[in-house]
Structures are given as C-alpha cells and as structure tokens.
Amino acid sequence: MRKQNSKFNTRFISEAGSELKNNDYFAFVELDKYACYVIADGINDMIDCEAAKLAIQSVILKFQENPSISKNAIKSYLKEANKEFLKADSKVKLKASITVVVSNYEKIRYGHLGNTRFRLYRGGLLKQESEDMSLADDIIKEDMLSKDLISRHEERNNLYSYLGKDKSFKPFISKKIKLLDGDIIALYTRGIWENLDQSEINEVFEEATNDAEEVLNNIEDLILSKQPEQLENYTFVVIFADKIFKDPERKRKIKKAIKITLMILIIVLIISIILYILHSRKMRRIESLNLAYQNTIEYIEDNNYIRAKEECNKALEISEKLRDKEKIEDLNNYLKLIEATIIADEELENKKYKDAQISYSNAKARAKFADNINLDYIERKQEETKGYLNVYDYINLGDILKDLKDYESAEQKYLQAKNLASDLYFNEGKEKAIQALEELYTEWDKEKQENEKEQKDKSEKELTALDIVKQGDESFKNGDYEGARLYYTNALEKYTEMEDLDKIDFLESKLMSIDQKIVENEQKIQLAQEYERLAIDFQAENNLLEAKKQYLLAKKIYTELGKDDKITEITSLIEMLDLEIEQENKKLQEELNNKESINEEDTETTTQNDNKEVKAKDGILD
C-alpha cells in the first residue's frame, strides 16, 4: 500500500570515464513498505575488481531478508557487506566506499562509509548532506577551509573508515529524516565531486524541474565540459520524491497515540506522585534521622545520657527503615557506649564504687568505636570513683592501725581520708572520716584516762615497794643480780606486810627464777635483734608500717631490759621511718587502686611476719 500510494522516481548515470572499466555500482529495490538505494565506489587498484558490486549485492540481499528503516537494521546491512569483503576469495584485499538509503516512503535514513556522497535538496536548496570520512576532510574542518578544497587535497582518498576494514568498523547511521513532496535525494561517487564544486552541483538543483533526466544530463554536461585529463569512474543518482505516502489512518493513529500518551502521562503522573510521596517520606526520614543523630551526639557531649539513649534509639529505628547500614553500625556503637555509661553512672550513684570503676573501663573501651566522643567524661568519672575508693581505703587502713593501738598513725590516715573527701566534695566519705576521727579520739582519751588512773592508784599503794622493786629492776638491768635479789627480798617483805598476795607470789617467782632471768634476758636480746633484722628487711621491701611495728617490738624488749642506748637508737630509727612513711603516704593513693590486691598483700605480709617471728623464736629456742 505504501509504494502504490507514493511516487518515487529514480534515475542514474554511471560511466567508466577515462578508465578501462567502471568499478562504480548502483542498485535499488522498492518493496511494498520499504525501499533501499545503494551506491558503492570500489577503491582497489585492480581493473577487474568488483568490490563495489559485491558490496551492493550483500546490502540488497540483507535488506530483502529483513527490510527495516531502523538504525540497527541499516548497520547490520553494512556489517554483512563488510563480512563478505573480509571472507572474499580475492587476490587483493577488497575495499569500497558505500552509501545506503532506506525509506518507508515517508521518511529516510542513510548510512555510509568512505567518501561516497549523500545529499537532500528541498525547494532547490541543500537540506542535509553526508560527511566525508577522509583525512582531508578532518584537515579542512580543522583549518576551517572550504569543502570544495577536498576534491584537490592530496589526502582525499586517505580514508579512516570504509568497507573491508577488519578493525574499528564504525559506519555512520543518520537519524530519520522526514520527506516532503518534491524532495530530491542525490547520491554520487568521487568521479563527480572531484570534478565538480559543491556550488556547481547546487546550481543544477536550484534550476531543477520535475524532470530527473534533465538533472542527470546537466550534471554530465558539466563534467564533460571541463574535459579533465584523468576522469575517474563517475556515478550520479537522483531520487525524486514526487509524492510522499500519506497514511489514511494517520488521524486515527494520532488520536490513539494521544490517548495512549495521555494514559502514559496519567500513569507516569501517578507513579511520579507515588515516587514523590515515597521520596518525600524518605527525605523526611533522612531529615529526622539526621536530627536524631545530631541530638544523640549533642546529648552525649552534654553528658545527658538518658536523653541521648532516647534519641539514639529513635535514629536507629529510622536507619533500619532506611536500610542505612553505615548509620546502623555507627548508632549501635553509640548506643552501646551510652548504655555502658548509664550503667556506670547508676553504680556510682548507688555507691557501688568497685562495680562503677569496672563499668567505666568498659565504657572507655566502647568509646573507641564511637569517635571517643565522651572520653573526657569517662576518664573524669574514673578519677572521681578512684578518689572515693581511696577515701574508704584510708579509713579502713586507719581502722586497722586503731585496732593495733597505733592511734597517731590511725589519726593520720583518717585525716588523709577527710582531706581527700573534701577535695572531691565527697560528703559521705568526709562524714565517715570525721566519725572515725571522733571515735578514735574517744577511745584514745579513754585509754589515756585509764592508764593515768591505774598509774595513780599503783603509785599510792605501792610507792615504797615499787621503788624497791625498781631498784631491784635497776640492779637486774645493770646485771647486778645479787643486788636485785636483796631489793626483791626487801620488797617481798614490804608486800608481805601489805598482804599483797599477788605481788608476794610475783616477787617469790622473781626470786625463784632470777637465775633463769639471765637466760631469758639473753633470749629477749636475741629476739629484739631478730625484730631489728626483720624491720630492716621490711624497710628494704618498702613495707614501712610492718618495719615500724618490728622496731616497736624491739624497742619494747629493750625498754623492758632497760637498754637505754638501744632504746635511743631504735627511737631514732622509728623517727626516720615516720618521715619515710609520711613521704610514702603521698604515693599511697596510686598504690591503693585495688583494695583487694592490698588486702591480699597485707595478708601475705602478715603471714611472712608470722613465719619470720616463728623462725626467730625457733632460733632463740634452739
């Protein structure tokens, strides 16, 4: 129907020129729905080479198998021709320039390789033309010269794309071109454009009538009138589109197309609205996510972890809906940090200081995965918790010293606890330290009063006898055991007079064991010397309290024995040790980080002391 209702008039001339054989070819086939027009120019040097003929046959046969005006179809026609060139059994490699025009009697599309020409004239004016695929064309474009110079350029036949090229096969395929009644299509080979300028060809079409033969004759007359010395094969084709096919169902198709287009637009609009709603929802979620994420960070920085947890959970919920894996991972790390910090704060608030210390360490480890955002807060809380623990450690150490009746050292520890608690604004610890001090002073005063009263009573009742006993003790201390015996005998008489049975028994026992006292005194001196040695060992181990204890035990023995020189020596050592203890107390805060480890150390130290005392006593007994 399309061919019958349209009128295409095709005419051509094709001559050998001054050559022995014409290697140009043109052929066309007009089917009911499509028409194909092919022009080819063989560019081999051999006279009898039929490259152009093979190219046209390949294209026409491929077109008849699959007639179409699509870009892919025209490209497949040219590929098929190139394939035939590459596998052809020829003495030389086949090469050709080619132009293919396919029409559906309403529109045309052309494809070409090489330097054959396509032109479309409308109303006598050039409407569209093909581009030359030669180095000469590139040079002229680059230098912005007239296209007419191609015909005389030495690189005009140096083609970068042509039939027969096995690599970089890239034909040019045009867009669809709508035809109008009276349009003229011109196809020609290099025998034409090498001898005629574009302006000369354009003049022929400007003066053209509806007579195709007249156009061909005018073109040929122009070539022959120039009488070139070497005239290449030349072929010129004109296709007069006198009447274009007009589809009788065009209006109905247009209406149908409009309806379909409207339906598509409505569908697209609906989809767009849905997508817009979804996108808007997504953007709102992203906005809410960013706000919650930012709030989480700000609340953490403000140390408001309860609100930070709320915002983090909100952001995490939105991230899961958005399937934002990166945000989910970050928020999970923040949430773990927040929860660990909340637990630590609760334990600190509930006075579980050891548990809080461990929890803050866990939170510090979590902070590494959350950009260390609250590291300063955690470290500050760790120091605060450590200070609270040290306050209680000082108080407990003071209690131990108080039980040992070392009231001065106990007072020092309680004061350290009180001062540290004041620095930390730890009111509870301060109150406990003050309470411990009050109890210490009460017990200390009570013991002093009891000692004073006992001493007074003893002085009143036993003044005379005591003096005699002291004289005996002095003699005994100086090694005058006989003199001591006389004093003890005299004192025994005094206590007998006072009917003090306990003292009588005591003095009788003294008299009975005076000889044994010599041995016992020697044993005591050895024991005191062992205490001194243990004190030196403990001092070398930096266990100053135990060292002081050993010196006190040694001093007590020397006091009992009346060894003034040794008492003076030990007293001096204890004073020096007190100075070291005072210096060591400043470092004690760092050493008391773990109360459990201190208790274990104290236990071990006590065990060692017991073992050393046992060894010392065993040595004395031996």
Image: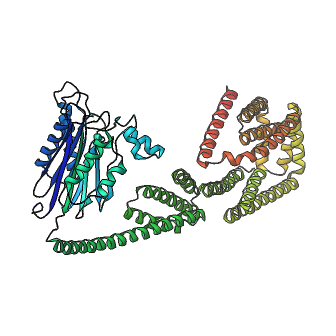
Tell me which colouring the rendered structure shows. rainbow
x, y (%) of residue 135? 39, 38
Asked where in the image residue 92 lies, by quadrant, the reply is: top left
- Could you tell me which residue is drawn at 12 percent across and 44 percent down? 61
Give above or below for 549 relative to 388: above
Q: Is residue 174 visible?
A: no
Q: Is residue 32 visible?
A: yes
x, y (%) of residue 208? 26, 58
Asked where in the image residue 246 lies, by quadrant, the reply is: bottom left
x, y (%) of residue 516? 76, 31
**Depth check, front residue: 544 or 366:** 366
**Depth check, front residue: 429 or 482:** 429
- Could you tell me which residue is drawn at 62 percent across and 58 percent down? 377
537 with respect to 84 (left or right)? right
Query: In which quadrant of the rendered image does the N terminus lie?
Result: bottom left
193 with respect to 39 (left or right)? right
- Could you tell me which residue is drawn at 80 percent across and 43 percent down? 578
Give above or below for 177 relative to 249: above
312 with respect to 360 (left or right)? left
x, y (%) of residue 598? 63, 45
556 with respect to 263 (left or right)? right
Q: How many marks?
A: 0
Query: In which quadrant of the rendered image does the C terminus lie?
Result: top right
**Depth check, front residue: 3 or 591:** 3
Give above or below for 591 relative to 309: above
